[in-house]
């Protein structure tokens, strides 16, 4: 059995971060989102993974390499344009070579992983097994209708959903899926929809079974979902200290302090993680905060936020909360006279000022 991870989207909901970086490499608890998917497939016993890549292919390749870091093999499959999930399956036929496979969306994180899904597929041997979860806003997802424990209908982003069971973004298929992706037509979005391909399987007598997700699941396509996933993962960490914390500082709760970190006259309340070679001075780092490598937080209060590598936040009045701060960003207090705000802000940025 092989794995197929989709990592070619443009990440429009995460701009401006994704103007310069792949959305699948945005870190959650200081680990790229994509790595959680790779690790989930590895834990399920899959050692051959194809990664669908697009405009950000070089960045993805540099981050994941040949897969040897996880003791598996990674093959890159280029998708010229984001033409749909079913199109990604279609162009991967040569790599998959007639084997059953699991398809995993690269910006998803599942607490429980996919091991139970893979085991169920191998035991029951349906033509497809799809992961579902109950959601409050099913019109935002592909939605499944069930009858006697089997999938009978799927609709992509329905205006009037017939159920609240959303497709999570993890699918198991045997080789019949290639018949389906070759038969369907592009949708109104000019994409080959995976929901249409699965519906083809249903209508042509193939067996499609549901698998309800246990534990939480996050599609990290939006900033609020990334922050929520960051919180959920940080809740599971165990504290450790490989840095240098002075006697005037206090570390409360589960806090990971990595090598080369210097903490001076500060309070850090976990769960939180401070990346390598970062400096925290005269500051408060609150719960659910992830700070990547080589950052400086000086005379600042921040919580429930993510700060990406090589950023500096210095002498910010008030507390920063629920924020995602990009790479090599500088936020600092200007001279008091004259009393003005000074910004250099990219497209589609958001700034809240009191």
Image (cartoon, grey):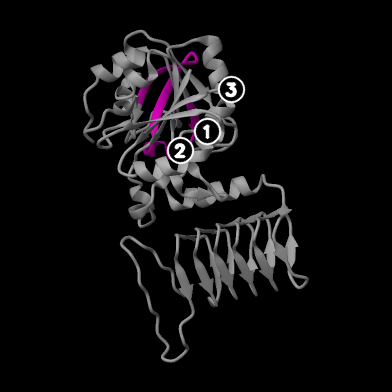
Query: Which residue is more in the foreground, 22 or 260?
Result: 260
- Vertical placement of residue 243 versus 118, above or below: below
Which secondary structure lies at badge 1? Answer: helix
Distance (Cα) linking label 3 and label 2: 27 Å
Q: Residue at x 68, y 67 (%)?
A: 263
Residue 319 position within the rendered picture, expressed as x and y whole percent measured from the top left: 56, 70
Decide if residue 97 is in sight here: yes
Q: Residue at x 37, y 74 (%)?
A: 343
Query: Which residue is more in the foreground, 198 or 87?
Result: 87
In the image, which disc is placed on residue 65? 2
| Mark 3 or 2, closer to the camera | 2
Query: Which residue is more in the foreground, 152 or 1?
Result: 1
- The residue under label 1 is 68
Distance (Cα) linking label 1 and label 2: 7 Å
Near mark 2 (Cα within 10 A), the count class, few <14, some 14-19 or many ≥20, is some
- Vertical placement of residue 66 versus 211, above or below: below
Q: Residue at x 32, y 21 (%)?
A: 197
| Left or right placement of residue 184 versus residue 23 in this view | left
Which secondary structure lies at badge 3? Answer: helix
Q: Give the range drawn in magenta.
A: 131-154
Residue 1 position within the rendered picture, expressed as x and y whole percent measured from the top left: 48, 17
Instruction: Evaluate if marks 1 and 2 touch, with contact meaning CB atoms under 8 Å apart.
Output: yes
- The residue under label 3 is 116
Q: Which residue lies furthest to the right in this view?
A: 247
């Amino acid at each position: 059995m092989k794995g197929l991870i989709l990592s070619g989207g443009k990440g429009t909901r995460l701009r401006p971060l994704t103007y310069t970086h792949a959305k699948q490499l945005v870190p959650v608890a200081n680990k790229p989102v994509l790595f959680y998917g790779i690790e989930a497939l590895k834990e399920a016993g899959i050692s051959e993974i194809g990664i669908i890549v697009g405009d950000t292919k070089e960045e993805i390749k540099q981050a994941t390499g040949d897969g040897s870091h996880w003791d598996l093999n990674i093959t890159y499959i280029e998708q010229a344009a984001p033409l749909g999930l079913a199109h990604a399956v279609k162009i991967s036929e040569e790599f998959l070579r007639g084997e059953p496979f699991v398809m995993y969306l690269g910006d998803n994180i599942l607490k429980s992983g996919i091991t139970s899904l893979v085991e169920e597929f191998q035991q029951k041997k349906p033509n497809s097994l799809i992961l579902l979860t109950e959601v409050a806003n099913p019109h935002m997802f592909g939605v499944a209708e069930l009858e006697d424990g089997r999938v009978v209908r799927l609709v992509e982003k329905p205006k009037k959903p017939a159920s609240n069971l959303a497709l999570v973004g993890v699918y198991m298929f045997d080789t019949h899926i290639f018949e389906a992706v070759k038969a369907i037509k592009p949708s109104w979005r000019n994409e080959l929809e995976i929901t249409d391909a699965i519906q083809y399987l249903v209508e042509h007598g193939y067996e499609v079974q549901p698998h309800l997700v246990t534990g939480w699941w996050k599609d990290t396509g939006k900033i609020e979902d990334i922050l929520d996933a960051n919180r959920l993962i940080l809740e599971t960490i165990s504290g450790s200290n490989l840095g240098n914390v002075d006697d005037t500082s206090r570390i409360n709760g589960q806090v990971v302090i990595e090598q080369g970190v210097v903490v001076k006259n500060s309070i850090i309340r976990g769960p939180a993680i401070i990346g390598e070679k970062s400096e925290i001075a005269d500051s408060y780092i609150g719960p659910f905060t992830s700070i990547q490598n080589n950052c400086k937080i000086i005379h600042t209060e921040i919580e429930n936020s993510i700060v990406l590598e090589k950023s500096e936040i210095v002498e910010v009045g008030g507390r920063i909360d629920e924020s995602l701060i990009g790479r090599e960003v500088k936020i600092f207090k200007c001279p008091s006279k004259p009393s003005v705000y000074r910004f250099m802000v990219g497209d589609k940025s958001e700034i809240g000022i009191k």
